[in-house]
Amino acid sequence: MTKKYNQKEHFLEAKWITRKDNPIEKEFSFFQDKPNMTFSKNFIWDGESKASLAVCGLGYYTAYLNGQRLGDAFLNSDVTNYDKVVYYDTYDISPYLKRGTNKIIIELANGWYNPAPVHILGKYNIRKQLPIGKPCLICDIQIGERHIYSDSTWDSGFGHLLQNDIYIGEVFTDENWNEDSNPQTVAVPGPAGQLVPSFIPKIKRHETIRPVNIERFGENWLVDFGQILSGQIAFEVKPDYIGTILLQYAEEKSSSGGKLDFTSTISGRYGLKDDNKNIEPDKPIIQEDQIIKTKTGVLHYSNQYTYHSFRYVVVKTGSDSFPLREMIAYRVHTSVENISQFECSSEVLNQLWIAGRNTRLHNIHSYFEDCSRERLGYGGDIVALLQTHLNTIDAEKIFKKVLIDFINDQRLDGGITQTAPYVGIMTNGTSNGSGALGWQLVLPTLALTILEEHGDKDFIEQYQEALKKHLNHLMSFDYDYVKMCCLGDWGSIDETASGFFIKSPDQEFCSAVMYLLNLQTYQKLSRYLSDLKPYQEELGKVIEIVKHSIKNEFYDDVQQRFASGSASSIIFALRTGLVDDEVIWYDKLVVAIRSRDGIFPFGIFGMSWAYEEFAKRGDNRLIFDWLTRQATPSYMDMIRSGNQTLSEHFSGGETFTGSKNHAMFSSYSSWLIREVLGIKVSGGRIEIAPASNLPLEWVKGSYQLPEGRVQLEWTHKDLSIYYSKALKDRISIETDLNIIVNLLD
């Protein structure tokens, strides 16, 4: 977790190893069948010495000892910039060993280290930006004082996956590949990054979901799981079936019924031609798995090194009967702990709580993703959901890992990338490789959150140089240039499209304000960090100059508004203190909402800030009415589908077909905990103040802190509070309800 980690404990003589296939393989042959790699080694154990394994396999790995799987992680190792850091895992393997000869097998897959050369969003070949290479392994088995290192003496083998890709899927065969061949293990340099112990929770399989319906679908079968999930499929193939099974995954059906609509899950195009695989450059990427069964007997199959976003699965078998049984799906995501629970008398709010939670978890796989289609770590989405993550999951470790991810991808000129890992996207960025201002805001915002909410100044102090470099980058621009470098309040229902260009409401104004907000966030950081203190005076001056410039350019004295006076412009102005009288401008915001029948037309930033602003002013009813609104546009348009996830767009505001598994508008979850339930945790203090004037019969829920739990139940008369004794001196209560206090221990 620290830059100064000392690697002497492991891997002193270990080599990165791979199977010697074709070292100069070209991209155009990527989709030809080639089984994944395995490596094995026999070793002796005396039955007494303590034994451990330190290992990293890229892109993904699974380790087996004497036929037993080590651990329950999937999609392992942690994704990052492998040129800067490589995370490894350690296992206590003594319980898996037997006296005498033991055998370890480690299987590798492509993951993010050897991704397919597909064009994400139709144009980004992520192989051109990510640190990539052949799948490779490094490990150190320590038995007492003896070490068994990975090197070219390990045996290479072939797995049963002919193809595997994180976006597309897997091709599995039950045949043993080239049984007469003699694969060779070779040492390679491996990635350039420093080996560091993994410190975040692992990606695991969670809730098991069974189909709600399986029906004939033309010559095929359609399986409906009743809800959208990001996860993996598992099933048995009946003993007598021989042939190839094709599974294709989608989030929704077409509006006319019948056929599936793959649009919301198409991540891009193949970008190359392969006649043998019927692949054309413009062929869309549809999530799919193939299972090739050549032998009689029951075949157990489950995804291992990919995951899909889906509700529906089309199963193509070429047979008259359905050959699958015991079909299930697993949610698969980083095993962050859910720290808060919520339930109330409003079924709409309950459904929104579930949909928000599901969608956010669906998009955490060792970093925060935007959606299950692109699977990219956009900084802007992280900023918009930061408060919700703080109030719903134990996020400290993954916050720190993501901060390191962005620092590892920092540009030479100090700019911060649009995504981390960086894949080439720099829409409206400040410089080559740098992201838009609202997305660069992720670095100082995460740093400030770790300082103020988690109290870990020592951790942030390690990265002062990167923060200083970013601040210098921001301050090196003239205002007239940098004010344009953002996407504004992205995702608003009022955004417009012209060809390939999407414009958010009052984009120029909101972009200029994003520059101001970056500077203001660094101003707050400078109060904590010694390396930033010398910037305080200059920052103060620049902030005032930028404020003055924004007002001169965008404020209309006649109309008394910024830019066109959109709701986004008002919330951005309030957020950054651009207005002299907050009450007057807050009233303007309320009028803007009520004039549109209670619709919140904000994008991802404005939506998150609006929940905070209205709650701060005691206008929780405005939020309640918006969240429970039935007419279009509304959250109910998403909920009615039964998908139990949120969509990228509100109905009626789509400028393109968005993902149906996108978390960016789930920022209301923080409001449900802090205001409706009434537990506000900040800076070590716990304030209990439920919004008991809302039209709810009852509310209950809990909040888990490291030192104990707070649990609430309230009606219009009584507030029952349960809390751990260790929290007693940190709790304050503000309510007109009759209070009943109980200790949990």
Image (cartoon, helix red, strand yellow):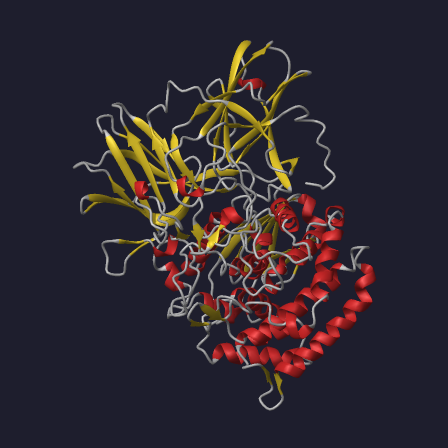
Residue 266 visible here = yes
In x, y percent, where is residue 568? 55, 73
Please name the residue shown 78% across and 70% down the image: 540
Q: Quadrant of the C terminus?
A: top right
Total labels: the figure holds 0
Farthest residue toward the left?
320
Q: Is residue 92 left or right of residue 477?
A: left
Between 274 and 132, which is closer to the camera in this rendering? 274
Q: Is residue 686 visible?
A: no
The residue lying toward the viewer, choosing from 393 and 293, is 293
At x 63% / y 45%, what residue is drawn? Answer: 401
Q: Is residue 404 above or below residue 98?
A: below
Q: Is residue 202 above or below residue 617?
A: above
Rendered location of residue 129, percent (x, y) = 55, 49
In this view, the residue in front, 564 or 162, is: 162
Q: Quadrant of the N terminus?
A: top right
Quarter where residue 676 is shown: bottom right
State which quadrant residue 585 falls in. Answer: bottom right
- Residue lying at 74% horizontally and 75% vertically, measured from the top left: 544
Spot occupied by residue 663 in the image (x, y as percentages of width and height): 48, 56
Vertical placement of residue 417 versus 233, above or below:
below
